[in-house]
Image (cartoon, grey):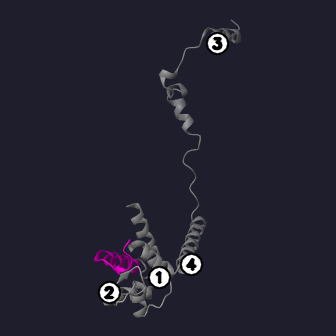
Amino acid sequence: MRRKRKRAAELRQAIDCLPERTRRAMLEGIDQNQIIVGAYTDNNGGVCPMLAAHRNGGRTDLASFAKAWDAYTIGPEGTRPATKREIRTLRAMLEASLWTDGPQEDLGMVVGQHRATQVERALREEHRSETHERAPRERPAWAWVKGLVRDGGADAVIDPEFKREPDAAEQADERDRAGV
């Protein structure tokens, strides 16, 4: 099952690499021709999707599509007509590829618009800073310390469970420092 998914992904990638005109021609070609797998043509009038596209104006020589199509469809029986499911899958992949290729904006144009927006924003900020003095801070950055002092100091913030009693050595040191 995993191998089939990988082959389907490779076919989709090969389709995406085809020029748009070839993908459109292939869609027309699969409607007008009997599609086969495992060969370019057969003796019964069947053609591969690439030849069908070629006959409808999509003149592209891309071996990766042919290899991906054969890998996706070929079985032990060799050349045979494509199943309805295989043709339906090919059509869906072609249509999805054309749909996602829809009108796309030029990358250069998008980058230019982005830069223009950045310049406008910078000019607005510069104008704002020139016309409006920045308001001084209401409180200094260290004002939170006053809250500790007002609310009982740092001891009020420390969780009582984490307070510990000094041991005997610390009490002796305290007495020595106090001169007792």
Q: Please name the amino acid that badge 2 sits on.
A: Gln
Comparing marks 2 and 1, which lies closer to the viewer? 2
Residue at image point 52% right, 30% down: 150
Q: Which residues are magenta?
A: 75-99
Q: Amino acid at mark 1?
A: Leu
User: Is disc 1 placed on a helix, strand or loop?
Assistant: loop
Does the magenta run of residues contain 97? yes
> Between tags 4 and 2, which lies in front?
2
- Mark 3 and mark 1: Cα distance apart in space: 82 Å
The residue indicated by pointer 1 is 18
CA separation, marks 3 and 2? 97 Å
Q: Is residue 50 left or right of residue 136?
A: left
Quadrant showing the C terminus: top right
Query: Along the horizontal axis of the image, is 9 left or right of 155?
Result: left
Neighbor class of circle 3 (other Cα within 10 Å; few <14, some 14-19, many 20+) is few
Name the residue beneath numbered marker 4.
Answer: 112
Residue that mark 2 sits on: 34
Of 57 and 84, nearer the camera is: 84
Instruction: Using a 10 Å C-alpha cutoff, classify the residue at mark 4 as few (fewer than 14 neighbours), some (14 to 19) or many (20 or more).
Output: few
Tell me the distance, in whole angstroms, between the alpha carbons under discs 4 and 3.
70 Å
Determine the image quadrant of residue 48.
bottom left
| Mark 3 or mark 2, whichever is nearer to me | 2
Q: Residue furthest left?
A: 84
Between discs 4 and 3, the one toward the N terminus: 4
Say which mark, if any, is on residue 170.
3
